[in-house]
Each structure stands twice: as C-alpha cells, then as structure tokens.
Amino acid sequence: MPAQLDLPFLTSAFEPATPSIDFVRMRRARKYILRVRPDGRVRVTVPRGGSRAEAQRFLERHAAWLEEERARVRASYVTPVWTAGATMWLRGDPVIIRIEQSGGRPFARYGDRSVAIPSDAVDLRAYIQRDLRQLAREELGARLRQLAAELGLTVSGLTIRNQQSRWGSCSRTGKIALNFRLMQMPHFVSDYVLIHELMHLKQQNHSIRFWRLVESACPGFRAAEDWLRRHGRGLL
Ligand SMILES: [Zn+2]
C-alpha cells in the first residue's frame, strides 16, 4: 500500500514518435474505428466479425490521416506560453493576461489579479504561478476548512504544491496537499478534488466504499473528472 493516496492526472505524457496502438474488440461496433487519444496513443476498434489482420490493414490505409490527427492532438496539448495577450484559465474562466503600468511599475493583470513583474519580463509564467500559489493558500485553504466542517472531518495540515503529476493527495496522518492549479479550475472541479482528498480521511483506498462516499458528498464528481480529463493538461 502506498503511504500517500494521490489523485493523479488522468492523462499521461504525450507519446513520442511511435505511438502505442491498442486494438479493442467491440461486439457492438459495426466498423473499424481509429481514434487518437489525448495522450497520443492510438486506439483501433475492431468490430464484431473483424480480425486483427484487417484492423492492421485499416490502420495502414489511414496512416496519413493518423499522422495529421496526432499532430492536431499534440498541438492542443502543448504547454501554453504565458505572455501578454495570452489566454489562461482562472476559476474556470478564460482570462487574458495584460501588462499594465501602475505608479511607474509594470504589473501583469489576469482576471481580478495583479502581480508585480520586472520591466523586462516576457514569459510571465513564474510570476503568475507564484501569485496563483498565494491565492490557492487563501481560497483553497478556506474552502477546505469549510467542506471539512460540513462533512464533520478534521484535516491535520494543508500544503499547496506545484505537483507535476497529481491534483492532490492525502497522507495517512491526515495531511492534505493540493496543486495550486486547482485555482484555475471551475469551482465544481476544485471542490471535487477537495472532497476526494477529504474522503480519504475516512477511506484510505479507492474502494467502492470510498467512491460511494465521494458520490454522496459530490454527486457531480463524474462531470468533474471529465473536465480534468479534457482540460487538465492545459493547466500545466
Ligand atoms: Zn484518491
């Protein structure tokens, strides 16, 4: 058993040049279907009565399409650059990053936030992320305490982290760690992550019992997981 329970990102890193290909038999499928998943892996659906050899030929016939589709998926996957004029997420809304002068000093503004930057700064990511982290300490901290009180649970500690592969975790001693990027998600999604971790105070596993607890406290959790699957990578 791991010492710490994580809520990992729901997609893994984008696959390199040669994608892995999953052949999946679907009795209900009527034809071969080719799909590039968000992480770049390729899935070939084999219909009822179909064969692996025929699926392979289908794949080869659509090699050009596949290459284009992988390029398209990859382009929507790359880490966005946070410069003036770029769009980023804040509390689930797209906001434009702008540079403004105030008292002769430059500030990066995004949504209702404003952060001082050096006058020669172009890539604003480091400054904005530091601000998001501060915001997370305030807002996520307050929200976690509120949810814990409503659910009758006690959190023994909270840290805000810059995790590269998970949204949150809960230690066996009741300490919760949250990714500052939760500040960029809609409330129903960040609430789900908080509730997910809080429920690990009751169930230190991902058993059916655990998911029942999550569902009773957060009936919309599947929509939240779906949001993370679709948009989570774009927050990195
Ligand atoms: Zn978990």
Image: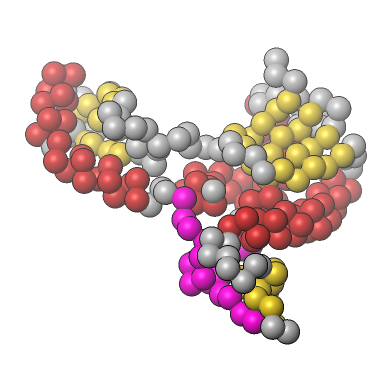
- Can see residue 7? yes
Q: Is residue 88 magenta?
A: yes
Q: Which residues are magenta?
A: 79-101
- Toward which corner of the image does residue 97 lie, by quadrant? bottom right
Horizontally, is 172 left or right of 29 in the view? right
Toward the viewer: 199 or 15? 15
Image x and y of residue 226, in percent: 51, 46
Up-down relation of residue 207 to residue 160 (above or below): above
Up-down relation of residue 209 to residue 142 (above or below): above
- Residue positioned 89% across, 48% down in the render: 149
Q: Is residue 133 magenta?
A: no
Up-down relation of residue 38 to residue 121 (above or below): above
Quick one: which residue is furthest to the front in this view? 120
Image x and y of residue 196, in percent: 70, 39
Toward the viewer: 187 or 103? 103
Horizontally, is 91 left or right of 176 in the view? left
Image x and y of residue 59, in percent: 16, 31
Image x and y of residue 121, in percent: 58, 65
Toward the viewer: 33 or 230? 230
- Residue positioned 29% across, 32% down in the render: 17
- Residue positioned 58% across, 75% down in the render: 99
In the rendered image, which quarter contains the N terminus?
A: top right
- Toward which corner of the image does residue 212 lie, by quadrant? top right
